[in-house]
Amino acid sequence: MRVGNVHYHKGNIMIKRFQTLLLTATIAAGSVMAAPQYPFPQNRAHPYGNTVKYADPQMIQDHFAKWKGAWYQDKGSEAWILAPDGIGSTVSEAIAYGMMIMVYMSSTQSDHQSEFDKLWATWKNHSMGGTGGMNWRIGEGGGDGSATDADVDAALALIMASKQWNDNKYLEAAKTLIGWMSTNDIDGNNSVKPGSNWNDAFNPSYGTLANFELFAKVSSDNKWNLVKTKAGQDLLACQNSQTGLVSDWCDWNSHQPVNTRASVAQDDSPGFFDDAARTPWRMAWAYYWYNNSDAKKFNAKIHSWMYEETQGTASNINSGYYPDGTKSTKRDNFTSSTFSGGLGLAAASDETDVGKAFMGSVYKALSNKTSCATASTCGGSTPGEKYYPATLNILYLLLMTGNMPNLYDLNGFTPFTPDPTLAPSISDIDGEQMKKGDTTVGVSGFWNWGAYHDKYNIGTKMVPDSGASPLFRKSGVIYAEASMEIGPEPEWTAEAAAAGTLKYPSAGIAMSFLESEKGVNLKTLGISQLRINANVQGPIRVALLNEGTTQAGGEPGMYLEPGTNYKDYLIDLTPVPEGYGSTDLEILSWVEKSTAPSGEKVLQTASGLKFELKDALGGIGSISIKSIEFLKADGSVVDPATITGITIPETPNPDSQGITDPQMQNLAKFQTSVNGTQLQIFNAVSGSDFAVFNMQGKVITKGKIESNTQNVTIPNKGVFMLRVGSVNRLISVK
């Protein structure tokens, strides 16, 4: 027993010594894990382009936590980012993306160096030669050979890691990988191959100009500058001449769209799909960091098409296009982070007010899209985005908000504190607000206006408030105006639809022709066109209200192209034969066609107009309407009184109304005639003041009666009020 007791005592000593050694080793290991040198949020404005300086870091943190919970899988000494589908595989692209995200999301509260190292271990253990590119897929459906986009992103992640955790081993590993890529991922012409084992065509999204410039600086190898130059040339050559879009794959010789064995959409024509969607993001990155001229030129070619196509909001970016800008008929059309962020970031180098506003819509769109919470049921019972869009969502947000700076060289990256007041928001309206229902004020003779917005408490705000008049007088002129913000639309599910819990945001202003809101037959009045002069910001849709449409929001309409100044919008109201709208007005895709009225009936029962903000992921817009004119086929303006039934009071003729005041009799006896744009005033009292007003009350021209026949030039067609002395006459210039 004694011996046993002694052995037992020695055992305790040995256990305690082992525990002490283990604790010491743990402390020593912990000391190697340096705290992040540039913790999230980095909040450093890029040297060039539009950095979003009003982002909410907590929102990005929340997106990351949800993404990591779904797609990061710890495998002991390794880790995967589950991809592309299901939970049985990963791809080198996902590992590289994960490495970049772990670098930039590491904070003082939550360091992710351990996760980074495990992802890097996966890369090394499945790479060529242990130091080269990773085999592009492991696990289910594994594949040999590297993918160049993954290789260049992994190398960049290692470079950034060397600075984030102050550890040179990462930089040395990056240099080794860069050297391997220069002979395996780049061909003899300095062209970017798709991967180490093949070279069928050029993938524009692999033209990572920022990475190449960084590699030239890190490796001191001028070859990477040559690669950057060649990639820039190929990128510009592959762009569509009208839209600036590129396809997923581009032929090396013709630089035309082509499908390859790696094309995701094998049964579709080549297009701007999931690979190509990343290209404007890559170009924004190169411009943000290095002011790359090819990158700026590439994205600038996209701007004008993108702004018009999407009505000025990233949430209207479709989930893929053919290079000419038309939508694929073989793909589902929906809103995705992949495209709203990838294409939307083309605006990063457009430093105009329009570009900055569009960047605000990109931020809004990405803010309102999040990952699935779990990978296994994503795409089924679990709402949210799958691996690819959810991962890009994080990377796009980090870059555009100043949380993906060049840690290798921070020169020019300016620290800032996010300021929510800089975010696009609704604004007050200048001028005197008119009383609702006053028939004596209006826009071009149309007086019955009202503002409306939902009361669902889902983020909708508006000036003026719902139920108020949107008419404002400024310098004697009446405008119809509104500044609006709406929240995101709910994600549709059959269960929610059946339960009636889907709440769709709405905000806008509407005008009824009649106080009763009954319809007016515009066809019998010979009306064929509508001309609106307005300043539009954001996705504003004008719709023709009518008695035939039964679905709320189902009226035919069109989006008004946003801009920075007032402009004319000419809308053709000619009914489409056997259709549901007119030449320019269309019903929305969700409208039930079996109950939608024909375009003919819409015109025959028209009751007014509405101008509504439409943004699926939530957004901001405004409209200021200066004039509304209904036109006949010959271009002549229809007197609004024939539509509204409200006539503008004129001074009665003294001969028929019994005016006895001699002065008034003399004033009221003048006559008028109109020939083209020339107005002639006859027999008015010499020396009397005269003025011509438009239907908003603005003075067009004025002067004094100098002769028995006074000639006055009217600058444009329309209905006007002539005042001589205190006497009014309505005139129509056709």
Image (spheres, rainbow, N blue to C red):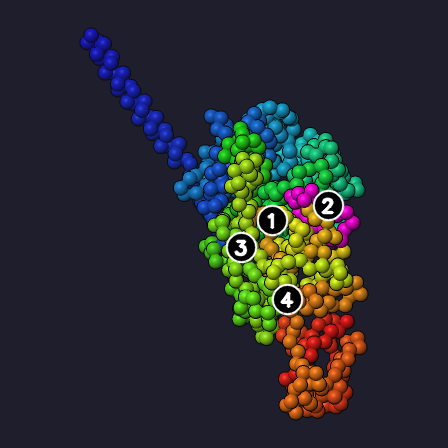
Mark 3 surroundings within 10 Å by alpha-carbon count, few (fewer than 14), some (14 through 19), many (20 or more) = many
Disc 1 target residue = 552
Cα–Cα gap, marks 4 and 3: 21 Å
Q: Are marks 2 and 4 in contact (CB under 8 Å)?
A: no
Residue 587, percent across and down? 68, 49
Does residue 114 belong to the magenta stretch? no
Q: Amino acid at mark 1?
A: Ala
Tell me which secondary structure the magenta stretch mostly adopts: loop
Disc 4 target residue = 446
Residue 535, percent across and down? 63, 63
Residue 611, percent across and down? 62, 57
Upstream in sequence: badge 3 or badge 1: 3
Cα–Cα gap, marks 3 and 1: 13 Å
Upstream in sequence: badge 3 or badge 2: 2
Q: Amino acid at mark 2?
A: Thr
The mark found on residue 326 in the picture is 2
Image quarter in which the N terminus is found: top left
Secondary structure beneath dot 4 equals: loop
Disc 3 target residue = 453
Secondary structure beneath dot 1 equals: loop
Q: Residue at x 60, y 34 (%)?
A: 93
Cα–Cα gap, marks 1 and 4: 23 Å
Magenta stretch?
Answer: 575-595
The reply to whether residue 579 is visible in this rendering is yes
Upstream in sequence: badge 4 or badge 3: 4
Secondary structure beneath dot 3 equals: strand
Q: Are marks 3 and 2 in contact (CB under 8 Å)?
A: no
Q: Are marks 2 and 1 in contact (CB under 8 Å)?
A: no
